[in-house]
Image: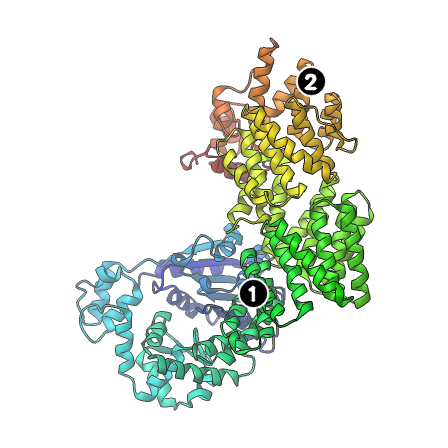
Amino acid sequence: MERSALLAAMDRTLAATGPGGRVVLVAGEAGIGKSALVRGFLRRHHENARVLIGLCDPVRTPRVSGPLRDIVRQVDPFATETGREETFAALQCALFRHDGQQVLVVEDAQWADEVTTDVLIMMGRRMECLPLLLVLTYRDDELAASHPLHGVLGSLPSERVSRLRPEPLSEQAVAELARLSGRTDTGVHAVTDGNPLLVKEVLAAEQPGVPAAVRDVVLARLAGLPPAARRVVRFVSVIPTRTALGTLTRALRPTVTAVEACFVGGLVVPDGEAVRFRHELFRQAVERSLSVLRYRQVQRLALRALSEEPGVDAAQLAYHAEQAGDGAAALRYARQAAVAAESSGAYQRALDHYGTALRYADRVPASQRAELLEHCSLNAYLVGNVDEACGMRVTALRLRCAAGEVSRAGEDLRWLSRLHWWAGRREEAEDAARRAITELEPGGASKELAMAYSTQAQLDVLAHELPSAIDWSTRAIGVAEQVGDEETLAHALTSVGSARQGLGDPAGRVELERAVDIAVRMNFPHHAARALTNLAITTMQLGEVTRALRDWERAWAFARRHDLHAYELYLVGHRAWWRLNFGDWTGAEDDARDALGRSARRSISVAPALMTLGRLQSRRGQADAADTLREAARLVSDMGEPQRVAPVVAARIEHAWLCGQPERAITEATRGFELALRTRHPWFAGELAWWLHRAGREPAVPDWIAEPYRLLLAGRWNDAANEWERRGRPYEQAEALACGDHDAAHRQALAIFDRLSAIPAATQLRRRLREQGRRVPRGPRAATAANPARLTERQMEVLAHLATGVSNAEIARQLCLSVRTVDHHVAAVMAKLTVHSREKAIEAAHRLGILTAQDR
């Protein structure tokens, strides 16, 4: 009822689906009729289209890629795919084997597991190549801002998506339904808000009026069933989604009459070779009506039946074992499910399953509890929960020490070093690394000792103690090769390669590439991600911009593909920093806010993003710069590493300088300069020496500082400006030009500052020139200066017309300008917004608040 328009829209979408795919999104609250709408659509087309259906499970830890694996097995019952790539490949194969129309339905996508959402994202990005109509139903009122389904919806090509939203039934429709059922509709619509499920069940209830909850309707129907049928319904209620007939037969051996009575009662319905509740609310109502004893009894029946069924997911068995109160089985199956999830790259699911196993770990020896804790810690680290990972590893260490397991205790200490570092606790990281080496060295060569050496090397790389890093890495490689440990070999090669690359030795890249090859071949994704990340960052520090950007793309894609969240955020933060340096300030802000927005907790992985955002806000003269930089300083304060501390110190110095507080700048610079000198970091030492010089101090400057700063400190501002220009660093180029001694340099500096919207720097230079009695080029007009993107009034007019989607020729006609003039204005708008398309320009303008919805 009242769904004909929606069905017609789905019909049109299917008719338009050719070689390139289409998507229909059906969203709404529970019971609004999403599934009924889809079933009605499928009934209209079951004879002329192949239909494949997958259902998502409403359980705490769902099966990995459950709905998509079910879909693949509808085509190929012997499919054995497990990971996201395998599942997607099998799905593609199944789709391309069919020549006619086909409809793929994923119901209740709000319960999809992470692998399923990843595969759906992959499908969305390739929708124009997939010959099908994809239908997703989901409860949009249950989606938090951080829900992973948003990533799926955002990946779908908008031009191929139809969004449908079943509305509640009108008062007239409810009245008609009531009339057909022989009831009056007094109060029904007001209480149910027209929700079709609630309306239907209220009107179908034996007692008049509206029951307090759906539970009363369901239990009334349940009570009307024969005893054998009630046993079937209760059994089906404890298995989310659907119950295979084979499972039902093994558990209860029900008669055909009993099963048919369930269908007649309207609570469960046939679903191919399975039975399921008509609605999830019905299932929950029956399940929650069971007493504790009866519930556990039914769950034990389900566990026994499912455990005898081949191919049942361990995650499902773990769920039923836990609900049945069978701790031993819950422990066993949860561990199996965790291993399967871990091997497929579903680290959050693995963490959840290991957490289930830990709840029952009191029944196993301490060494096994420690092993579970270590696995939990590893997966927590991989998904970015560093503090949680650290706590678990500390508990595991305590158990290993109590049991006298020296080598495993040393391994836990080594991991604690890494975790403390990620949490921003450099001192604790150093202490744990030293303790690991002390514990392990008396035992001679071992995998654990090799990794402890390599961990110390890693800490030295991060502290820019490069000769020491090479020494520890060499020791680690020697022991790793002696005991045949390729994992540590990959880890140590990453450290030594990073150290040598940092020293300008080309052999460093060779060693990093070898580390990647070993880590990928041996399936150590986190080691491969570290090597790829270091390769990109050190290459950029050497000034090889094009090569570094290619390395970054490779590292970021790898981290994203393997769900290495911390590395992904770290890399996005570094790209934000690079974009800031290269003058793409809009892109820098986008990246920085993206990384910070996706980080639930502030850890070292978002330090580059935080520092970049603070420096950008400072250069734009924004009031929140101080707070952002204060947070960045707090995050890195305990690190003692130049690559963490020096950029934040430099950003705070610059902020103090631009705010007219040179004394505070001197204090900040002095502290950071000592660290940069001690670690012989040419870029950080050069930048901080330059700030001290500008603030009126003349530090003793070594000859190994970076070339642009060496030129500036020698008074060769023009050569420094040329060097910055060669490196693609416009803001630094303008700062060097501002030190010049003639008007042409000053005009060029001001032009760059104005183009970048570097308001404080431009204001300071203009003030200084006026005080010297020099001729000062006029800055942007007041309206332009107030505009965050420095757009003129005419450019704002052009932007407003762009938002309407008209052509340049039409803009020229409406504004009485030549087309060539409009072309120039459009190019200027995109340049100032640092974008490369009209669509991106509109997005950037809305983001900056200079284009409102009324302008469209």
Please provide percent x and percent y for residue 538. 72, 44
Please provide percent x and percent y for residue 361. 53, 74
Q: Which mark is residue 241?
A: none
Please provide percent x and percent y for residue 742. 69, 13
State the SS at label 2.
loop
Residue beneath the point at 58% across and 60% down: 130
Q: Earlier in the sequence, mark 2 or mark 1?
A: 1
**Is there any visible trace of residue 551 in the rendered image?**
no
Please provide percent x and percent y for residue 240. 43, 74
Q: Along the horizontal axis of the image, is 677 left or right of 357?
A: right
Check if mark 2's residue and mark 1's residue have beta carbons within 8 Å: no
Could you tell me the amino acid type at mark 1? Thr
How many C-alpha atoms fall within 10 Å of the one at disc 2: few (<14), some, or many (≥20)? some
**Is there any visible trace of residue 636 in the rendered image?**
yes
Residue on which disc 1 sits: 395
Could you tell me the amino acid type at mark 2? Gly
- Seen in the picture, residue 583 relative to 575 is either above or below; the reply is above
Residue beneath the point at 54% across and 25% down: 659
Residue beneath the point at 65% across and 35% down: 672
Q: Report which quarter residue 769 is drawn in.
A: top right
Residue on which disc 2 sits: 740
Q: Along the horizontal axis of the image, is 314 left or right of 500?
A: left
- Seen in the picture, residue 535 relative to 482 is either above or below; the reply is above
In space, the residues marked 2 and 1 are separated at their CA atoms by 61 Å
Q: Report which quarter residue 575 is drawn in.
A: top right
Quadrant of the image containing the C terminus: top left
Q: Report which quarter residue 27 is drawn in.
A: bottom left
- Seen in the picture, residue 530 relative to 573 is either above or below; the reply is below
How many C-alpha atoms fall within 10 Å of the one at disc 1: few (<14), some, or many (≥20)? some
Quadrant of the image containing the N terminus: bottom left
Q: Say which of 543 and 812 sits in front.
A: 543
Circle 2 or circle 1, nearest the eye: 1
